[in-house]
Image: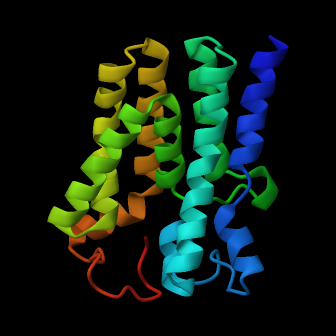
Amino acid sequence: MLIDISIVVFAYLLGSVSSAIIVCRLMGLPDPRTEGSNNPGATNVLRIGGKKPAAITLMGDSAKGLVPVLIAAHLLNVSDLVVALTALAAFIGHLYPLFFGFKGGKGVATALGVQFGLSWEIGLCVTVIWLFMAKVLNISSLAALISMALAPVIVWYFWPAQELIVMQVVMSLMLFWRHRSNIRDLLSGTEGKISKEQGPSSKG
């Protein structure tokens, strides 16, 4: 029981470490919470700082989901319920970080890290769907929403545990909620395109 609780708490605390804010501070960039879309995520870091800090942020955010789930699922060999709670804790930590006033990012990279932590097949399938949709639709947020909407089915196919399927459904719903401004822009036809330079008013 102590191990189960510890890995869940560790996942939330790790998720609460904001890669975007830390990277921007270390590289002398503006706080991503006050520039661009005001979102501490890789897309906004790309907007205000370029590819290198954005790539570092993306890797950091992904690792926050990957590391605790890998430990829980493949090293500690805990129950499916604890794996699911660990995954959710890391994801919620990113969305509502303890160390940064509970104001975090939108969760796509961390969710993808969780999926790779469960199995490389799950992570790869979600990634391929995202890349294909991004190429076809040319809208990053829509590609992310479609891939995460399909993620519960992918989890069910590769690891059909009820706890993990419910976890992914909850995670996808929370991700949709965090993207509600993007959804409004999609419905109004004003969401930014990947191929176009996005200005400070963009909401990625």
Q: For residue 29, say whether it is visible.
A: yes
Q: Residue at x 29, y 21 (%)?
A: 157
Q: Quadrant of the C terminus?
A: bottom left
Outermost left residue: 136
- Residue at x-position 25% and y-position 48%: 129
Side of 39 where 153 appears, left or right: left
Q: Does 114 sit above or below residue 105?
A: above
Q: Is residue 45 left or right of residue 153?
A: right
The quadrant holding residue 53 is: bottom right
Above/below status of 128 relative to 158: below
Expressed as whole percent of the image width and height from the top left, the position of residue 183 reads: 32, 61
Q: Quadrant of residue 153?
A: top left
Q: Residue at x 28, y 49 (%)?
A: 128
Q: Quadrant of residue 150?
A: top left
Q: How is the image coloured?
A: rainbow
Whether residue 184 is situated above or below residue 127 in the rendered picture: below
